[in-house]
Image (spheres, rainbow, N blue to C red):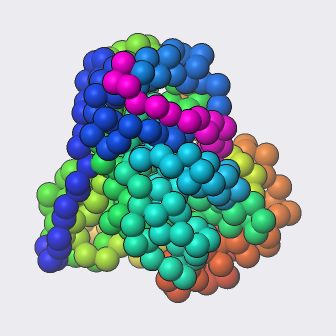
Amino acid sequence: MQDFIYQIPTRIVFGKGAVSRIGELAGEFGKKALFLYGKSSIKRTGVYDNVTGSLKKSKIAFVEHGGVKSNPVLSHAEKGIGIAKRENVDFILAVGGGSVIDEAKAIGAGVRTGGPIWDFYTRKRSVEAALPVVSVLTIPATSSEMNCTSVMTNEATGDKVGFSSNKLYPAVSVLDPEITYTIPPEYTVYSGVDIISHLIEGYFTHKDPYVPIQEGFAEVLARAVIECTERCLDNPSDYQARATMMWAGSLAWSGLYVAGIGPIQVPNHLLEHPLSALYDVAHGAGLSIVIPAWMRYTKRENAPKFARFANAVFGIPSGESAEEIQAAAESGIEALKSWYLKIKSPVSFEDAGIPASDIDRITEQAVRLAAIWGLDNYTKDIIKAIYGMCTMR
């Protein structure tokens, strides 16, 4: 167990009907909001009317900035900063999934800190202050409602980069599982994949020899997410499954389970970001492509961890000899990939319509990101080799 400091200032309001309280909760942060959301889904499902009705009841004015993409882009965030400044808003209200909340954080930082917000992502500047962000989560996946990270795509360069700052934690996040009943099946799938990806990054890359609490936490959540993803697909209105997925999504990348395990890396996010940036595939879809390839490429060095995961999550037995551990690790990789196929998430470039001939281009994007994130052990040759394995189904 390593030394750590852990503090999450976000207040979580969880439960049935919680979204109707948004006006009351947001009123603590001012009387005018920039209301940020995606496209038409919140209007189609009634969430928009519920939110705006609550805001009006609490006499909170708002100016709308809809149209956030599932992979949020820099130009839309910059436009939002201009609106927020012109309208002199007090806080950002983000109603949507992780992409909307990520963009809200960028806008809040841009308004208060000033200067080009892309500088935050490229580590040229730090966030000095940010407008408060209040969120209503509609798609559980990224933990953005409970963490201090924002991911953005720069359309001009094709780079998709994330950064973190303690100034970016949402002030309040409302989690109402009932509003997730209408999530389309494919996005229920991608949510499950994304949540598990957040659990395995630290689980597979940490070096601490004894962290049973953290590893057990990741294993339990992974099992729950696998079960609940399938339950949600079978019955979209299964409240217990939806509630479990929502809370698992918030916890997975909140920093809780990686506290005390020392430095970790995020190689699968490094490999995925160029896919969603260049081809606008859903983040979860890109992850289900790269994770099995990364696992197979690193199997020899990570076999004990892969074997443990295989046993804890999929019930695959493992012996003690090197050969038995390698065999269990291989079986675990196949079990995870088979689950992706079962829930109809892509497992190859071809599945997602990504040309294998673009590997050099994708590799260059990942190499630039590796430099920003300090992942020096992921060289151009290694990245290209893993992408080559993504062409095989």
Query: Which corner quadrant holds the N terminus?
Result: bottom left
Question: Magenta segment, which residues?
Answer: 57-71
Residue 73 % position (x, y): 67, 54
**Residue 241, relative to residue 336: is it above or below?**
above
For residue 360, what is the image quadrant? bottom right
Residue 310 % position (x, y): 35, 51
Residue 55 % position (x, y): 40, 25
User: Magenta segment, principal secondary structure?
Assistant: loop
**Going 31% across and 35% down the picture, which residue do you hit?**
27
Which is more toward the observer, 78 or 90? 90
Evaluate whether residue 57 shows in this view: yes
Q: Is residue 320 left or right of residue 391?
A: left
**Going 67% across and 82% down the picture, which residue do you hit?**
381
Q: Is residue 288 left or right of residue 265?
A: right
Evaluate whether residue 296 shows in this view: no
Which is more toward the observer, 307 or 175? 175
